[in-house]
Image (cartoon, rainbow, N blue to C red):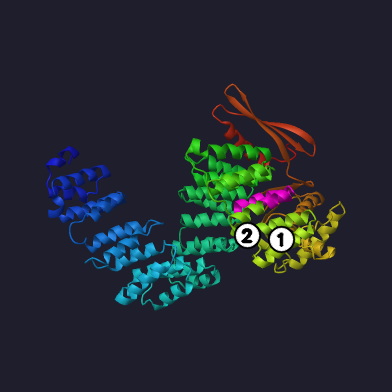
Amino acid sequence: MQLHALTQVSGRSLSQLLSKRPPISQIKQIHAQIITKSLALSRLSLTDSLIHCYLHSKNLNSARTVFDDYHLPSPPTLLWNLIIRAYSKLQHSSESISLFHRMLTTQAVPDKYTFTFVITSCAHQNSIVYGNIVHGMLIKNGTLLNLYVANSLINLYAVFAMVNDAHELFDEMPVRDVFSWTSLLCAYAKNGNMRRAGDIFREMPVRNDVSWAVMISGFVSCGSYTEALKYFHNMLSEVKPNEAVLVCALSACANLGSLDHGNWIHGYIDKNCISETSNIKTSLIDMYAKCGRIDRAYRVFDKIPRWDVQNFTSMITGLSIHGLGEEAIRQGSSIFYNMENLWGIVPKIEHYGCYIDLLGRAGYLAKAFGIVKSMPVYPDIVVWRALLSACRIHRNANFGERVINHLEQLDPRSCVGADVLLSNMYASLGKWEKVAQVRKIMGKQKNQLDIGCSWIELNGVVHEFRVSDILHPHIVEIHDKLSEILKRVALVGYTADATHVSFDLSEEDRERAVAWHSEKLAIAFGLMSTPPGDTIRIVKNLRTCEDCHTALKAISRVYDREIIVRDRSRFHTFKEGMCSYFYNNVQPIRKGVIWSVSIFCTGKDGATEISIPGHSKKSVVELVFDFAKWLAFSNAQDV
């Protein structure tokens, strides 16, 4: 039926049109006809259909207007359920709860669907109070026995990590399905109790992709990345992984620096024609960058037809951790300041964190601090840690104190973790009185410090080492190998730097403390387990200390190995007794419509100029990305 003929149709014809779920423009014309012909009172089904159609077209405001103007004393329960369900899907809305409270004052009677939608909304609130009230109502009217209502309640308690309440409710259920089991599983995973979650997972009579996703994401959240990958590969024999599972698995690979596993997952995605959503592409960029393949990260980024905030954040972070020196500043600044103008993306906290880290590492402390103080979003601990770490790297204790003083004036909670960096900074400068003052404060706060942990992947197996590790099955041989390594590197001038170790230990004990750092253990295991000449790749959860940095340079020289270490902040490539190369001047050059990039680098053999040819369709920013791709994997001998 043509739109211009709507003026001639009857209420019945309008009802038939609405049943076909027309587009929003036609819905509004039908709505206008209902009003002008006063059909709302005589044909209530038209009002019901209008609400259905508006909700189907995702026009919640119009649906709510029609609902609020309902002519009977109260809309039927079905319509209440439709509106409450629509609002329950909004993450930061309490309107479903307000509507439910209003419903209780009318003649409409809530049913099992009403309670399911209201409980879903309660799970989106900041407090469990609303959920507890609804739970009490369910016990009173007996609706709690319904499977779907009980599942919603278990999920509610899972969201708030109230494990005991969730399990008690689960035990009382006369009938359970896969959603009941998965919701209980989620409660334990959110609470960090992956051992109990694993027990429940093995007890489940039926598992689906969501059940597997809960387990894998739970292990990733707890930092058990190896276990996450183990579950991922076991999952493939039962069900096909969904987007959430793939993202979590790639995240585990990124944190472990497991390039082999990451490559395999990327190949699995391509082989099975799985749609590469923005989340998957972002995870691939992050994985390749953190596994040392910035060229592949850029390749994924370059193929994205329309970039979003997550894509940019992952790519910028990848560039920053590869330590591109002055060019990283120029590239990061170009992208950061043009995000909104060129791509319509407003910088968020993640982007500010990346940019501040770039500036700080390059020594632009004052500029970085100025941005932190003026940024429109509240800086989190990651931002402050990046700034303080820069102060430590550049041995600028005065500036570090300024940052700490500023933090204390804003919010004491912002200082969590910052005092460790300040203590290390003072220790490196030999200011032991200052170290004592900071550590006294740390003792009062009782901060839980991160334990140093390193990973190395050999033949598809990821081995984990912790500081002073004694749990690895080959730890005795590893200790012997490390002792041999330290003796050999001492012959070429290496001496232990224990300036960051606690000042109340003897010199011998302080040297012993740095000798058994986790990355040294991983390197020792790598040297004894791989053929001569093979590259050794290590991932560490904390920043590499200055002693390990010096030791790894010496080890690369003595054993003629390339050693690549990714710590919490960046990549370090050790080769022939040096760490990476310093690129001190990167200049874009334009000749007509053709651009190129000229790079002046300083290495062990002096200064060298390298040119990357341009293309008429490439901007300077794109050329710099090409340079970043080249830089990450250029062999020093090629330079």
Q: Which residue is drawn at 25% across and 66% down?
A: 105
Furthest toward the right, the residue is 491
- Is the residue 330 above or below the residue 537 in the image? above
Question: Could you say whether the residue bearing mark 2 is in a helix, strand or loop?
Answer: loop
User: What percent of the width, then of the height, locates residue 536?
Assistant: 71, 53
Q: In this view, does 228 lie to the left or right of 45?
A: right
Q: Residue at x 39, y 71 (%)?
A: 132
Q: Is residue 130 left or right of residue 447?
A: left
The tag earlier along the polypeptide, 2 or 1, is 2
Please state which of the two labelled residues, at mark 2 or mark 1, is closer to the viewer.
1
Which residue occupies the foreground of this view, 276 or 160?
160
Furthest toward the top, the residue is 592
Question: Could you say whether the residue bearing mark 1 is in a helix, strand or loop?
Answer: helix
Main secondary structure along the magenta-highlighted residues: helix
Mark 1 residue type:
Val
User: What percent of the width, then of the height, locates residue 292?
Assistant: 64, 48
- Is the residue 504 above or below the residue 324 in the image? below
The numbered disc on residue 438 is 1
Would residue 605 be visible to someone looking at this image?
Answer: yes
Quadrant for the N terminus, please.
Answer: top left
Crowding at mark 2 (Cα within 10 Å: few <14, some 14-19, many 20+): some
Crowding at mark 1 (Cα within 10 Å: few <14, some 14-19, many 20+): some
**Cα distance, mark 2 to mark 1?**
12 Å
In magenta, the rendered stretch is: 381-402
User: What percent of the width, then of the height, locates residue 375?
Assistant: 56, 45
Cβ–Cβ below 8 Å for labels 2 and 1?
no
Would residue 535 be visible to someone looking at this image?
Answer: no
Mark 2 residue type:
Val
Q: Is residue 24 left or right of residue 338?
A: left
Q: Name the residue under label 2.
A: 416
